Image (cartoon, rainbow, N blue to C red):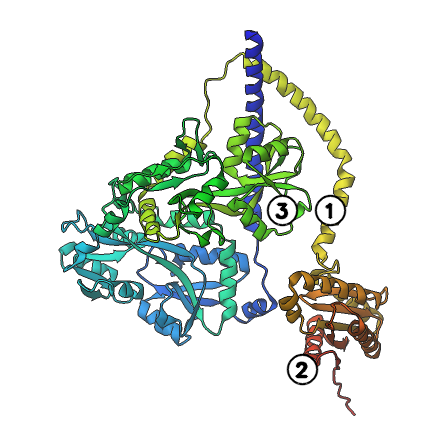
């Protein structure tokens, strides 16, 4: 019995070893594929944005010469830094050419106001700038701190200690100028340059200044490492790009580029440019934070009741002894240490129970929670304490999936009431989601082929796959979103999130890495017995045979893969809602018809349709009814055209009809026929649906784009002539005698 048990134990360990080897290989391949896909991803621009970039091949943004490492002027005239790298990635993603110029900050603002340059980089949203600039979403958020000279000779530890002290402010830094207005009992000195400011601080001419990680970086760069952080301020500096107000397309392009930059990518760039600053963590040397009197009163308001996810390792769990454990448990211990307080665990048996308790104020804090709009009704949130990729797990026999849209109607398990479910539903509303009660239940259903896949955090899935010894499950896709785990605070305690953020920011990267390795690193309980080697060799031999067999099986799938490729090609050229050719295919088909028309000297016409007042249908009846109307209109129009005609969805509620071998008069008659048919058809009870049309015949002396321009102009005339009408566009010819 003992020998059999030992053999069984060895077999399990061998299988687990082999599974881990294969699984790590799959993860590496998938990760490489994801990185490659991310590097090839580009932004889809509107025609207006594309036209804007053609008309503005270079867009120049100004910044301050002294704001390193955000912008750095190099000896060769080039500009590098964090901002430059962010803009370079945006240029790669959008095809734009945003460039930087540096100089005096006040001069840059003056030039931006006069349109001598096109906007500002390294900017903050200041009321005075909104008169001439429109701002993007933030591309970097920096924690604002109060800095003093090395050693903190005046023992400035909180806001109260600043009374009667002298604060130095860089004159051109409007954000700090606004911030300084709060310190009415301090003397404010305005200085022209950061170098002048640092010198004044080192000599004792001033007592303190505001700054962030960039301030420390530049101080070291100038050979003036005189600063140390005394304490963090509740304010954060959101850096944005400001663009001249008459260029909304540029703002839209920048935001689209920023939206494709993942948190990990921005963090990589930030780490590269800020990593040289060895003193950035000076404030983290002491374990306990120095709190103001008001902050101390808040912390002492015991008890502090804590709710957690009771069964979601490696992030959070309540073990059999009733103790809180996991990544967030260790982080909460550090926060309690920094604030010199204690959180009292309120045990629960399910996540839903924990959420209900804090909803009804029977808990004060809840960890491992993802901020959502629904939860904002009863919670406020800290900054994320941990970020995890969201992944799709499937069985080993499934192909790699580029994204969730290829899953179709196959059932996907997601833990009920989780923040992940909200994120997935928002981005993939048509996904067939199956609620599961727990991660264990979801993986069990997946292993038994009762669902196609299971979605959760990468670390959570890896933990439970390892724990339950699932050897038939793999990661098939990394989704384009991250799970941001924060601390939720009851809504009527707004004073707590800034305090918790202060403690979170005080936790060093080294401490986070130690926690990560403790809970997420691979562990080996004991050395592998050499007797296992013979078993491994035998199994590897079997695997070699299976690889050969699999190769022969794969050959039989070539035909199926060819069919799949054809289906994918159709999906790429077909509008998903109406099943008509999309704009890409319409472009190709129209160019083909133009070539045939020019070669054989045959007429060719086109019609551009647009449904009248379609937005009112969506607003009144909802987008589902609007989609149904588009589908019905497609069907009715398709019945009215010839087999040789090409009807496609041009975009939104616009349709393009290409009519080979058709004169202008013939196309007008066809457009009128369709217009009358649509007007007489009943799509929605009590409401008439009509359309307007622009018609044009192709002229041998024009190109595709000029034909489209004439179609669009004709449609515009039809719209402005009362709608439900057909308008034509003719090319006027001049005869020479």
Q: Quadrant of the C terminus?
A: bottom right
Q: Secondary structure at mark 2?
A: helix
Residue drawn at x 18%, y 48% is 150
Q: Secondary structure at mark 3?
A: helix
Q: Secondary structure at mark 1?
A: helix
Q: Which residue is mark 2?
A: 720
Q: Is residue 75 left or right of residue 430?
A: left
Q: Nearer the viewer, residue 278 or 412?
A: 412
Question: Circle 3: is it few (<14), some (14-19), or many (20+) Cα within 10 Å?
Answer: some
Residue 42 visible at all: yes
Question: Circle 1: is it few (<14), some (14-19), or many (20+) Cα within 10 Å?
Answer: few
Q: Is residue 386 above or below residue 720?
A: above
Task: State the image coordinates of residue 62 (x, y, percent, origin top left).
Answer: 39, 66
Q: Is residue 463 left or right of residue 395?
A: left
Question: Circle 2: is it few (<14), some (14-19), or many (20+) Cα within 10 Å?
Answer: few
Q: Is residue 509 left or right of residue 389?
A: left
Residue drawn at x 46%, y 58% is 87
Viewer-nearest of discs 2 and 1: 2
Q: Which residue is mark 3?
A: 404
Q: Quadrant of the N terminus?
A: top right
Viewer-nearest of discs 1 and 3: 3
Q: Kindly indicate the quadrant of the structure image that contains residue 348.
A: top left
Q: Give the number of the disc on residue 565.
A: 1
Mark toward the start of the polypeptide (3 vs 2): 3
Mark toward the start of the polypeptide (2 vs 1): 1
Task: State the image coordinates of residue 214 (x, y, percent, origin top left).
Answer: 32, 54
Residue 224 visible at all: no
Task: State the image coordinates of residue 473 (x, y, percent, origin top left).
Answer: 61, 32
């Amino acid at each position: 019995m003992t020998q059999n048990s030992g053999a069984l134990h060895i077999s399990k360990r061998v299988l687990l070893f082999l599974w881990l080897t294969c699984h790590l290989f799959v993860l590496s391949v998938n990760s490489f594929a994801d990185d490659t896909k991310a590097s090839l991803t580009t932004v889809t621009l509107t025609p207006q944005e594309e036209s804007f970039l053609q008309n503005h091949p270079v867009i120049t943004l100004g910044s301050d010469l002294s704001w390193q490492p955000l912008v750095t002027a190099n000896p060769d005239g080039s500009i590098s830094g964090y901002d430059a790298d962010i803009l370079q990635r945006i240029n790669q993603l959008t095809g734009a050419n945003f460039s930087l110029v540096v100089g005096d900050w006040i001069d840059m603002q003056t030039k931006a106001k006069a349109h001598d340059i096109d906007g500002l980089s390294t900017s903050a949203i200041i009321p005075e700038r909104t008169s001439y600039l429109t701002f993007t979403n933030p591309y970097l958020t920096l924690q604002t701190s109060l800095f003093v000279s090395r050693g903190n000779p005046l023992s400035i530890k909180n806001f109260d200690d600043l009374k009667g002290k002298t604060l130095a402010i860089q004159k051109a830094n409007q954000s700090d100028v606004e911030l300084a207005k709060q310190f009415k009992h301090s003397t404010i000195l305005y200085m022209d340059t950061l170098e002048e400011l640092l010198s004044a601080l080192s000599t004792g001419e001033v007592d303190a200044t505001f700054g962030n990680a960039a301030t420390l970086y530049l101080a070291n760069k100038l050979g003036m490492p005189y600063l140390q952080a005394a304490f963090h301020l509740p304010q954060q500096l959101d850096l944005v790009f400001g663009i001249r107000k008459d260029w909304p397309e540029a703002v839209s392009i920048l935001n689209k580029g920023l939206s494709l930059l993942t948190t990990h990518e921005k963090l990589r760039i930030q780490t590269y440019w800020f990593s040289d600053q060895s003193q950035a963590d000076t404030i983290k040397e002491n374990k306990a934070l120095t709190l103001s009197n008001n902050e101390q009163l808040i912390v002492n308001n015991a008890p502090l009741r804590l709710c957690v996810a009771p069964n979601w390792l490696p992030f959070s769990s309540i073990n059999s002894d009733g103790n809180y454990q996991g990544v967030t448990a260790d982080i909460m211990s550090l926060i309690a240490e920094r604030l010199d307080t204690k959180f009292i665990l309120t045990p629960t048996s399910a996540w839903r129970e924990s959420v209900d308790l804090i909803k009804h104020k029977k808990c004060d804090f809840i960890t491992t929670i993802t901020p959502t709009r629904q939860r904002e009704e009863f919670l406020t949130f800290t900054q994320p304490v941990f970020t995890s990729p969201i992944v799709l797990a499937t069985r080993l026999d499934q192909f790699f999936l580029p994204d969730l849209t290829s899953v179709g109607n196959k059932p996907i398990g997601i833990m009920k009431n989780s923040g992940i479910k909200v994120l997935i539903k928002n981005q993939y509303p048509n996904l067939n989601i199956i609620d599961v009660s727990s991660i264990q239940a979801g993986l069990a259903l997946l292993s038994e082929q009762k669902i196609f896949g299971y979605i959760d955090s990468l670390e959570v899935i890896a933990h439970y796959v390892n724990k339950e010894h699932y050897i038939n499950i793999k990661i098939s896709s990394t989704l384009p979103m991250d799970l941001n785990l924060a601390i939720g605070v009851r809504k009527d305690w707004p004073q707590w999130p800034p305090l918790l953020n202060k403690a979170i920011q005080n936790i060093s990267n080294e401490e986070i890495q130690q926690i990560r390795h403790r809970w997420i690193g691979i562990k080996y309980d004991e050395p592998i017995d050499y007797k296992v080697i013979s078993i491994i060799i035998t199994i590897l031999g079997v695997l070699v045979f299976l690889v050969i067999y699999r190769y022969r099986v794969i050959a039989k799938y070539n035909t199926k893969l060819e069919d799949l490729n054809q289906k994918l090609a159709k999906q790429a050229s077909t509008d998903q809602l109406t099943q008509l050719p999309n704009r890409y295919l319409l472009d190709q088909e129209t160019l083909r018809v133009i070539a045939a028309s020019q070669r054989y000297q045959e007429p060719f016409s086109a019609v551009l349709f647009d449904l009248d007042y379609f937005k009112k249908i969506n607003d009144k009846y909802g987008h589902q009814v609007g989609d149904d109307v588009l589908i019905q209109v497609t069907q009715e129009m398709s019945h009215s055209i010839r087999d040789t005609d090409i009807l496609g969805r041009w975009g939104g509620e616009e349709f393009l009809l290409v009519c080979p071998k058709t004169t202008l008069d013939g196309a007008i008659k066809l457009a009128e026929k369709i217009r009358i048919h649509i007007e007489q058809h009943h799509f929605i009870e009590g409401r008439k649906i009509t359309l307007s049309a622009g018609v044009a015949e192709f002229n041998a002396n024009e190109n595709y784009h000029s034909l489209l321009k004439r179609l669009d102009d004709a449609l515009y005339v039809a719209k402005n002539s009362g709608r439900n009408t057909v308008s034509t566009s003719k090319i006027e010819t001049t005869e020479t005698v």
